[in-house]
Image (tube, helix red, strand yellow):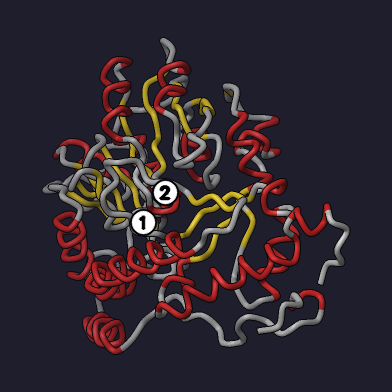
Amino acid sequence: MSKKLAIHGGEPIRTEPYPTWPMAGAREEELLLEVIRSRQWGGYNQFVGKFEKLFAEMHDCRHAVTCVNGDTAIEIALHAAGIGRGDEVIVPAHSFIATSSAVSRVGAIPVFVDIDRDTYNISPDRILEAAGERTKAVIVVHFGGIMAEMDRIQQVAAQKDLVVVEDAAHAHGAEWHGKRAGSIGLVGTFSFQNTKVMTAGEGGIITTNEHDIAARARSYGNCGRRQGAGWFDHFILASNYRMTGFQAAVLTAQLEKLPEQVRLRRHNAGLLMKSVRTPGIRFQTAPAGANVQSFYIVTCAIEEKEFGVGRDEFIEAMKAEGIPCAPFYEKPLYKNPMYDNLAHRVEPCPVAEEACGHSFWLPLATLMGGEEDVLDIMRAIEKIHAAYKPIERSAGLAVN
């Protein structure tokens, strides 16, 4: 193997691409054909109800309500939980924009708090500090498919009388002490967007163990209708957020594959974390109760002083070596321009701000192959470190 980095003209670690994502096959085609032949392509296709039941059962919930995407799922969940105008909702400072924008869309006020340095999930202590008289809920993101510290979060929520919403967009099949994501808080939400661990291109679902929450969520996503009432009877101001039969058919096939795919990613992620011993690379850590992680992504931080090069230069070197790699969110959520004109509150978030400059992630496709595919990631990291490690720089040696 050439010691010269590919970014400097050397041979890359690998030239073969990683497995493509999304993955689909004969089963998806079979079920899609059933929908086409049914002539009922929309949200009242039988696959929608069947998928909701299967997903709820797999995630230890009594109820599940599908919708058009994960963003809308959070909005519907907040409405169903009674969160509205003037209420405060605590959210992590680092997440996808949907986590906080849904709060603003229901008229509530997002309160941004810091994350834990090791888990990258919302800090229970920061939730406790931020909760005030107007605070009604907290949205907990299971970032990267690793469950947040749910025991402590539930304790804080009970102490402060907060509704817990689990944003499990990354965490299909993940577990906390044997309980599946989306079953621990009052309500959970999932995304089926194109990159997610199970996908129909787009789509979302709301999970809950409370009948009233499920009924309100279903009404809000189905034009304000109520089960058993007339087709033209609309009881609340709502819209049509129904999932199509096509999406539900694809997701049924995807759900069948989920347990084995989670097992594969867990094995490969474990191998990667055991193999990488390079100074300056720190992996996201799962809290003790997070006994099953879905590994939507592998999140890492790079410490420049120990590793020898900064995050952005490292990412470019990794991509040149044939390893897909991307920087962390470039800024905390509250630094998005939309919040120049929207009500919000920001608690001190030094960990989130640091993570935005030093962290990166590997996409799930890097964990969907064999062990050699995983070890190529380790080899690339070692190769880059060997070229940049501080001891060589201090000795005045040339960088390959």
Q: Please give the count of numbered marks on the rendered protein.
A: 2
Tell me residue 162's x, y (percent).
Answer: 32, 22
Q: Residue at x 26, y 49 (%)?
A: 291
Image quadrant holding the C terminus, namely bottom right
Residue 220, can we see it?
Answer: yes
Residue 174 lies left or right of residue 334; in this view the side is left
Amino acid, disc 2: Thr
What residue is pinned by disc 1? 204
Dots 1, 2 in contact, CB < 8 A: yes
In the image, residue 33 sits, relative to residue 196, either above or below, namely below
**Which numbered tag is attached to residue 149?**
none
Q: Splitting the image into 4 quarters, where does residue 398 fall?
A: bottom right
What residue is pinned by disc 2? 72
Tell me residue 124's x, y (percent).
Answer: 39, 27
Q: Residue at x 39, y 59 (%)?
A: 295
Q: Nearer the viewer, residue 47 or 254?
A: 254
Tell me residue 89's x, y (percent).
Answer: 44, 27
In the image, residue 227 sits, relative to residue 349, either above or below, namely below
Q: Dot 2, crowdedness within 10 Å: few (<14), some or many (≥20)?
A: many
Tell me residue 116's x, y (percent).
Answer: 48, 34
Residue 23 lies left or right of residue 383; in this view the side is left
Per the image, label 1 sits on a secondary structure element best described as strand
Q: Splitting the image into 4 quarters, where does residue 157 fall?
A: top left
Per the model, the C-alpha gap separating discs 1 and 2 is: 7 Å
Residue 291 lies left or right of residue 67; in this view the side is left
Q: Earlier in the sequence, mark 1 or mark 2?
A: 2
Amino acid, disc 1: Gly
